Amino acid sequence: MEGQIADKKLELIQWLSTLEDDITLNKLIELKNGETALQWDLIADVEKESIKKGIADANQGKLTNHSTVRKLYEKWL
């Protein structure tokens, strides 16, 4: 397990050393500093309500399986 973590760290260090993208570097610095805004804070209230409703429906077992949905919307896919 420790070897796998060390390998992942080394891979990230190698990738980071070649990174030229300022936006990605800044986002990584924000992540390191704990400054990243949650995507939740960036979406509209109506979208938040829709997500909350979907989670509540799922928690109540109000779900439709993928194959049923796919058949329903097949002509648009």
Image (spheres, grey):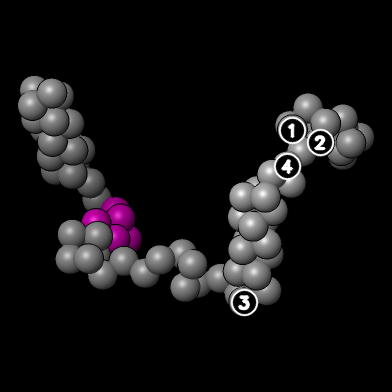
Comes first in the chain, label 2 or label 4: 4
Label 2 sits on residue: 69
- Rendered location of residue 55, percent (x, y): 61, 55
Judging depth in this view, the residue of 8 and 71 nearest the camera is: 71
Label 1 sits on residue: 65
Marks 1 and 4 in Cβ contact (< 8 Å): yes
How far apart marks 1 and 4 lie (CA) works out to 7 Å
Task: Specify the amino acid type for callout 2.
Answer: Val
Nearer to us of marks 1 and 2 is 1
Marks 3 and 2 in Cβ contact (< 8 Å): no
How far apart marks 4 and 3 lie (CA) works out to 23 Å
Location of residue 48 with respect to 22 vertically, above or below: below
Marks 1 and 2 in Cβ contact (< 8 Å): yes
Badge 2 element: helix
Label 3 sits on residue: 45
- Count of number-bearing discs: 4
Is 27 part of what is drawn in magenta?
A: yes
Task: Specify the amino acid type for callout 4.
Answer: Leu
- Rendered location of residue 74, percent (x, y): 87, 32
Location of residue 30 with respect to 45 vertically, above or below: above
Label 4 sits on residue: 63
How far apart marks 1 and 3 lie (CA) works out to 27 Å
Q: Quadrant of residue 22?
A: bottom left
Badge 3 element: helix
- Rendered location of residue 62, percent (x, y): 74, 46
Label 4 Cα neighbours within 10 Å, binned few <14 / some 14-19 / many ≥20? few
